[in-house]
Every structure is written in C-alpha cells, then in structure tokens.
Amino acid sequence: MSAAVFQAKLWYAQRISAMILGICVAIHLIIIFYAIRGGLSAQEILGRTQGNLAFALFYEIFVLACFVHAPIGVSNILQETFPNSGLAKPISWLLAILISTLGTTAVIGVYSGGSL
C-alpha cells in the first residue's frame, strides 16, 4: 500500500471517528444534564449504570472512537511540528494504548461496580 493511500485511509478513519465522537459527546452531555437536573448522587448514578449493558456498550464505543481519533491527530501534529524527530509514531502508539487500556478499564469498572 502506498503512503498516499495509507494517509487517505487515516484521514477517513479520523473523520469517521470524529462523527462518532460528536454523537457520543452529545449523548454524554444529555446524560449529564439529566443526572444533574434530577439531583442524582454519584451512588445513584453508579446504581443505574452498574450491570447496564447498554451504558457499557455506549461508553466502549466512545472509548474506541477516541482510540482511533486522538492518536492520528497527535501523530499529525507531531509530524508537522517536529518533522525529523521520529517521535510521532511511538507517542501516538503510546497514546492509543493508554486510551484503550484506561478507557476500557473504566467502562468495566463502572459496569461491574469496581470489581475486575
């Protein structure tokens, strides 16, 4: 695969993940406003989300969209800012690993009630 084709695929992946993130952020904000307006405590929120597969799937989709979107953007910024440093790939991979690991751990923690 040529470099141009690979860059085009990354461009599409970032744009598609941005669309998914936009929807996820909007839904997340609606959930927050609902919880705040209803005066729910953290314990009540966790009581509603613990064991709720729909919440877990939604937030895992959110994590996966971040996993795709953020490392591509960071890599592009680093390549433009420091073109000959070789930092872009390792830092973007590290970011991807951190997002997927920490995000999925958080989703599992909320779904299972904190016990992994």
Image (cartoon, grey):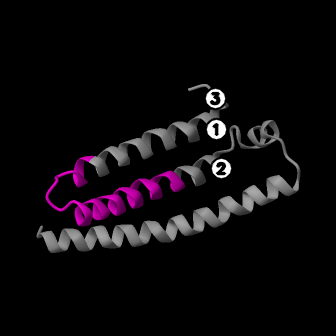
The residue carrying mark 2 is 55
Q: Residue furthest top?
A: 115
* The C terminus - image quarter: top right
Q: Main secondary structure of the magenta part?
A: helix
Asked whether, in this view, residue 21 is left or right of residue 54, the answer is left
Q: Residue at x 56, y 39 (%)?
A: 106
* Sequence-first disc among 1 and 2: 2
Which amino acid lies under the numbered mark 2 shown in the image of this protein? Phe
Q: CA distance from mark 2 to mark 3?
A: 15 Å
Which amino acid lies under the numbered mark 1 shown in the image of this protein? Tyr
- Span of residues in magenta: 61-90
Is the Cβ of the residue at disc 2 closer than 8 Å to that at disc 3? no
Which amino acid lies under the numbered mark 3 shown in the image of this protein? Gly
Front position in the image: 67 or 71: 71
Front position in the image: 77 or 70: 77
The label shown at residue 114 is 3
Question: 10 Å neighbourhood of mark 2: few (<14), some, or many (≥20)?
Answer: some
Q: Residue at x 53, y 55 (%)?
A: 62
The residue carrying mark 1 is 111
